[in-house]
Amino acid sequence: MRGWGNSHADDFKAAFIGAGTELSQEMKLEEANKRAKEAVDFLVAALESGHSEVLAAYLGAMARFHTYSFGNIMLIARQKPDATNVAGLRSWNSLGRFVKRGEKGIFVLAPMIRKKRAKKDESTEEEQQDSNQPRLYGFRGVYVYDISQTEGKELPTLTEVIGDVSGYRERLMKFVESQNVELSFSDRIAPAKGLSHGGKITLLSGMQPAEEFSTLVHEIAHEMLHRGDRRTLTTKQVRETEAEAVAFVVCKSVGLQNGTASQDYIQVWHGDANLLRESLEAVQQTAAVILEGIARGPAALAAAS
């Protein structure tokens, strides 16, 4: 894994930034997407070369950085697949930690947001309000550093769930309910562990909590991803692979181990980088929504519904 990560980071950054391009230069959305796409192309090349472990690193990055954009997740995974907690230089310094001498930063894209300047002839209240809305007008390249690249004060310890779904199981069920999906249990679906059928999920009765949690994530992923046009535009193999990838990301994020995910992802998409990117982006966005829902807890979900 490391051979496909850090050892090529310098070459990747050089190609990524491009000759004559400064990190502070503003980039349009198309250029930002192009650069994120290069990270996906790297994943495709790695998988085609037999390095299926690279996919696990990318999915692991989704689990650890689920609040980040898809593009930045791809960039972090490409340059430092073992990263767990990244921040800018100033952020680390404010926490009493400092980047170690000789460490090289991880290149990501930071959004550039500003308010639209009001025109003199914008006299209506609606036009004035619109002019005060912050707008994304570009991106700039910045460097962040993983916690392993820093030293100093210890960070506050967060409670981690290791092989235990206490609390998360109930939150996940509340999240499923908030999606207007009916959940039931049955012995009759064996040997299947779970089934989703258009607004309804049935789980096999009597499973262990961790297995039940993973199965429920898999089935709610189907409900969120495959009940619209994607169901007719994708094969069953693709749908199962996407749902399993979502389960892998969510479970890994809360500290559960649920296998190695699908390691033949590229075979599903027959080497098509564009389709692979679309699929991975759908996986990332779906996992992020689920993780946000179970992090907020039942009370917040009820208030938001």
Image (cartoon, rainbow, N blue to C red):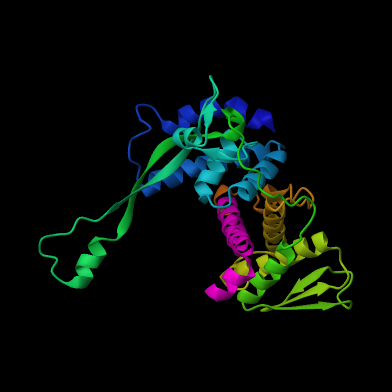
Q: In which quarter of the image is residue 131?
A: bottom left
> Which residue occupies 76% across, 63% down?
213
> Which residue occupies 49% across, 43% down?
36
Give how far across and how far down residue 93 sits, in percent.
48, 32
Q: Main secondary structure of the magenta part?
A: helix
**Quadrant location, the N terminus:** top right
Question: Is 27 situated left or right of 293 in this image?
Answer: left
In front: 289, or 10? 289
Q: What stretch is highlighted in magenta?
A: 276-305
**Quadrant location, the C terminus:** bottom right
> Residue 257, relative to residue 154: is it above or below?
below
Give how far across and how far down residue 299 sits, in percent.
60, 71
> Residue 252, relative to residue 207: is it above or below?
above
> Which residue occupies 51% across, 30% down?
105
Decide if residue 218 is in sight here.
no
> Residue 148, relative to residue 71: is it above or below?
above
| Residue found at the far left of this picture | 121
Decide if residue 222 is in sight here.
yes
In front: 227, or 59? 59
In front: 252, or 57? 252
Give how far across and how far down residue 244 sits, in percent.
72, 58
As for residue 287 lying within the magenta part, the answer is: yes
Q: In which quarter of the image is residue 243?
A: bottom right
Give how far across and how far down residue 12 sits, in percent.
52, 30
As for residue 301 lying within the magenta part, the answer is: yes
Question: Is 73 situated left or right of 258 in this image?
Answer: left
